Amino acid sequence: MQIQLEKTLDVEIVERELAQLWTESARDPNADTEAAVLRARVANLLVFISSEAALDDVHQMLRELTAIHPSRVLLMLGAREATDQDIDMFVESICQTDKRGGIRLSCEEITMKATGKFVAELPSAALPLLVPDLATFLWWQNAPRVSDKVLDTLLRATDRLIIDSADFADPLSELVEMNNLYGEDEFDHVGISDLNWARLTFWRGLLADYYDVPAYQPFLNSIHHVRIEYVGPERTPNTLAPQVLLIAGWLGSRLQWQLSDEQPVDENDQTTSFSFTSKEGHAIKLELNRVERGEHKPGRLVQVELRCGGDESGARPSSFIVSRSEDNLHLVTEAKLGQTSHRGRVLPVRNRSTAQLLSREMEILCNDQIYQEAVAIAARMIDLLLT
């Protein structure tokens, strides 16, 4: 049950309503007399969204998430382009039930809605309601711009910022803004998570696995061409997808490649190429190729191929491939050494829900240095592309 509060930002009134909600939740008619309802909070979760159309999906996701991480949820809906309307506040309990339908766990959600100029006041309403001595996470479903005063204020009280670059309306400029956040000294205490980066975990693991095979090392030391295939983002299908830029940045940072200052080449409507130099000094062509969707999801990788040898290095032509199966259910590896092909691992694709991805990120507080370095190279690639 959701209760709308009177027009007030009085913390005591909010806490009193939450206490009353918990008391009512504890009176579970389906519970055994010896059963107890636990009011649990292991974290503070700030959520910022800018569209009321997303509200139902977010509520559903929060029910799934709080079953794993019971939290005080402070959900802020800020529609900046709408007519000015002061903050409306609602409180409700989020209850988890056992197999027999009895309530066993209860936590709370406080929803704040504001439009127009009153969006700027949402942090002043939310931050006093944080539970002291608990880690605070901010799930920001908006463009992560350094100049955004609401984001600035919330980050100062946050331990970890969680975004999803798959949802970026303007992927190129917003990835650059993500990189700019790392340059702000006042946000050094904030770790940053990208759910889209988490989706690349298996891709990164499978590519890294090739380097654990001693017989592959002579070939991998002579990479001269990388071809990455991807499906365009849903909102901007003709734009480079954040996933392809992140995996390219990850390869460049882990293998210590230097991005050339040469302008990227648009070879056709689907293909853009960048130039890198390996740490050994030889040239590497990075080719980003957009392909038709088929069964593949918008914005997702389809294939990464590392091509090696066949040049002055003397190594036999070879390639190392990680690809998504046609049915979109598996990731498959294949190593081609000269005329010999070695089929490798086949892993099921784990299409984790947003709640499952968020849950993993809420177990981490430190910054992800590897992600930071990947974003830095991706941002430089974008700068070259837009110059």
Image (cartoon, rainbow, N blue to C red):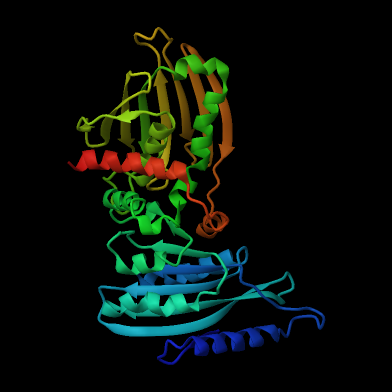
Q: Is residue 307 above or below residue 110?
A: above
Q: On the image, which quarter does residue 22 sit in? A: bottom right
Between 121 and 165, which is closer to the camera in this rendering? 121
* Residue 355 image point, x, y percent: 53, 60
Outermost residue toward the bottom in this view? 6
Residue depicted at x 30% and y 59% = 145
Q: From the viewer's perspective, tell me whether residue 148 is left or right of residue 134.
A: left
Q: Is residue 203 above or below residue 129?
A: above
Between 130 and 289, which is closer to the camera in this rendering? 130
Screen quadrant of the C terminus = top left
Q: Is residue 202 above or below residue 44?
A: above
Q: From the viewer's perspective, tell me whether residue 105 is left or right of residue 265.
A: right
Residue 293 visible at all: no
Residue depicted at x 40% and y 34% = 253
Q: Is residue 289 above or below residue 52?
A: above
* Residue 311 image point, x, y percent: 35, 10
Residue 275 visible at all: yes
Screen quadrant of the N terminus = bottom right
* Residue 285 image point, x, y percent: 31, 25
Residue depicted at x 46% and y 44% = 369
Residue depicted at x 41% and y 13% = 317
* Residue 148 image point, x, y percent: 29, 65
